[in-house]
Image (tube, rainbow, N blue to C red):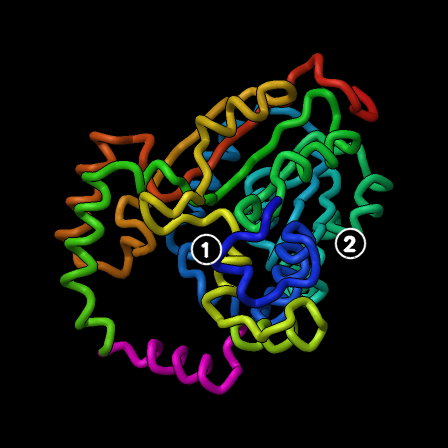
Amino acid sequence: MEIPDWLAGYGPRVSLESLVEEINKIFHSFDATQYDREHPEIHQQLPPIWAEMTAQLPHASPWNVLDFGCGTGFEASMVLSALHDNVAKLIAYDPSTEMLAVCKTRLSNFSQVSFCSGVEEIHRHGPFNLLLTNSLLHHLPNIAETIDSLMPSLTSNAIWLAGHEPSSRFYRNQECLNLLERYRHCHKYAKWLDLRNYAAKLGLLLGRHPLSATANAAYKRGLFSKRPAPWVIDRIVDFHVGHSADDGRGLDFETMKFSFQRDWILHWSKTYSFLGPFGYASVPNKWVVKAHQLEKRFPSDGANFCMVWDRKQNSVNALSA
């Protein structure tokens, strides 16, 4: 991977892959305690979507579950609540010990859950017949390599629930972009009435915001020869998140279906968020109505998507069937 132009001026001292991994780990160590507050979709948007995803699972038990990149434990709590006693064990993995601490508190009532922060521990706990990821893939420098590395720990009939990833299809659909721009035009003055925007800007100026704190920590650790701006950290953290038609970033479930065809079959997918980054619960109803109209016309072009994958039965490298 080549260092992009927007990053080169800050003199990164490690490879781009290592930089993405390290910056994400640092950022989420600062962001762990406020992550759930900053992501209202966890409470408003995603629970019914994860209910649809778990409904795709066959009636089988027991489930041995790997929650890879568990974060604060949202998807684990969804699956544990949906499958109840059919979960024999669930291993919650995250490289951020701070995220794991929040996850442990969230899942403290579930006796079948164990936690780990080292990849090598995953293989000792396998094999798993259910893999969970949520809002994870866009943080990875190389998605295919990461999923491939998990294959030896998955059974030959494993199922993968992949939730809440950013879709580049939204930004390639001009009608979706037109609605987003019209809403932004109406919203741009109202946002200054929200005191949270001022608090966030003050945090950035004082170095207390996770982006600023990450920039300082990364510079002190020698990852850059020049202290990066907070917006640079933001782009590294959300490595595969696009924000425009010409951004060149973002994921596409149709492209992923082709990329993963050797080992996985895309069983089910759904896109949503037809107002881009703006959640329906926080916008006037007239805009929600317009977004739903787009959803009916372009069901594959929402700004976010989720997927259910079945591992191919002839896929190699499984520990056991």
Q: Quadrant of the N terminus?
A: top right
Q: Quadrant of the C terminus?
A: top right
**Of 36 and 277, the residue lying toward us:** 277
Q: Secondary structure at mark 2?
A: strand
Residue 315 percent location from the top left of the image: 71, 17
Q: Could you classify mark 1 by the number of other residues whose Cα lies within 10 Å: few (under 14), some (14-19), or many (20 or more)?
A: some
Q: Mark 2 or mark 1, which is nearer the start of the sequence?
A: 1
Q: Up-down: is 130 above or below 21?
A: above
Does any portion of residue 109 appear in the rendered image? no
Whether residues under marks 1 and 2 lie with C-beta atoms below 8 angstroms apart, the answer is no
- In the image, residue 272 lies in the stretch drawn in magenta: no
- In the image, residue 207 lies in the stretch drawn in magenta: yes
Q: Secondary structure at mark 1?
A: helix
Q: Seen in the image, is 268 located left or right of residue 26? A: left
Q: Residue furthest bottom?
A: 206
Q: Quadrant of residue 260?
A: top right
Marks 1 and 2, Cα distance to the nearest angstrom? 23 Å
Q: Quadrant of residue 71?
A: bottom right
**Of 271 and 92, the residue lying toward us:** 271
The residue that mark 1 highlights is 42
Which region shows up in magenta?
193-210
Name which residue lies at 41% across and 78% down.
200
**Of 232 and 55, the residue lying toward us:** 232
The residue that mark 2 highlights is 116
Q: Amino acid at mark 1?
A: Ile
Residue 104 percent location from the top left of the image: 69, 61
Residue 143 percent location from the top left of the image: 61, 39
Q: Amino acid at mark 2?
A: Cys
Q: Up-down: is 302 above or below 309?
A: below
Q: Seen in the image, is 101 located left or right of residue 162? A: right
Name which residue lies at 86% across and 41% down.
124
Name which residue lies at 49% across and 87% down.
206
